[in-house]
Image (cartoon, helix red, strand yellow):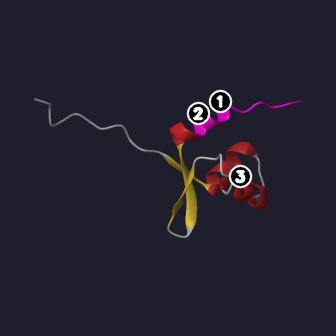
Amino acid sequence: MKNSNECKPMLVIYTTDDVCKMFHLGKVKCLELFRRDDFPAQKYGRGYGVEAEALKKYMSTRHILS
């Protein structure tokens, strides 16, 4: 039997504003990113959001050329 006092992990969802600040993107570029087919964003009401773990996994697969 599970202890009823156990805490479930908190779900963290980043908004487009959060992602803009984290990656220093403008609003237009950020929305383009959120609308990409390979980006793990979800539509929440009138806005978009991305789960923290999904964003972390997505960013780990990206290659940045300098």
The correct choice, above or below, for 10 with respect to 18 in the image is above
Is the Cβ of the residue at disc 1 closer than 8 Å to that at disc 3? no
Query: Mark 3: which secondary structure?
Result: helix
Is the Cβ of the residue at disc 2 closer than 8 Å to that at disc 1? yes
Q: Which of pointers 1 and 3 lies earlier in the amino acid sequence?
A: 3
Q: Amino acid at mark 2?
A: Lys
Query: Mark 1: which secondary structure?
Result: helix
Corner quadrant of residue 30: bottom right
Q: Badge 1 is on which residue? A: 60
CA separation in Å, label 3 and label 2: 15 Å
Q: Which residue reaches farthest bottom?
A: 46
Q: In the picture provided, is 45 more to the left or to the right than 29? A: left
Q: Residue at x 38, y 42 (%)?
A: 10
Query: Mark 2: which secondary structure?
Result: helix
Q: Which of pointers 3 and 2 lies earlier in the amino acid sequence?
A: 3
Q: Badge 2 is on which residue? A: 57
The correct choice, above or below, for 18 with respect to 8 in the image is below
Q: Badge 1, how many Cα within 10 Å: few under 14, some, many 20+? A: few
Q: Amino acid at mark 3?
A: Leu
Q: Which mark is residue 33?
A: 3
Q: Residue at x 66, y 35 (%)?
A: 59
Q: Which residues are magenta?
A: 55-66
Q: In the picture provided, is 54 more to the left or to the right than 62? A: left
CA separation in Å, label 1 and label 3: 16 Å
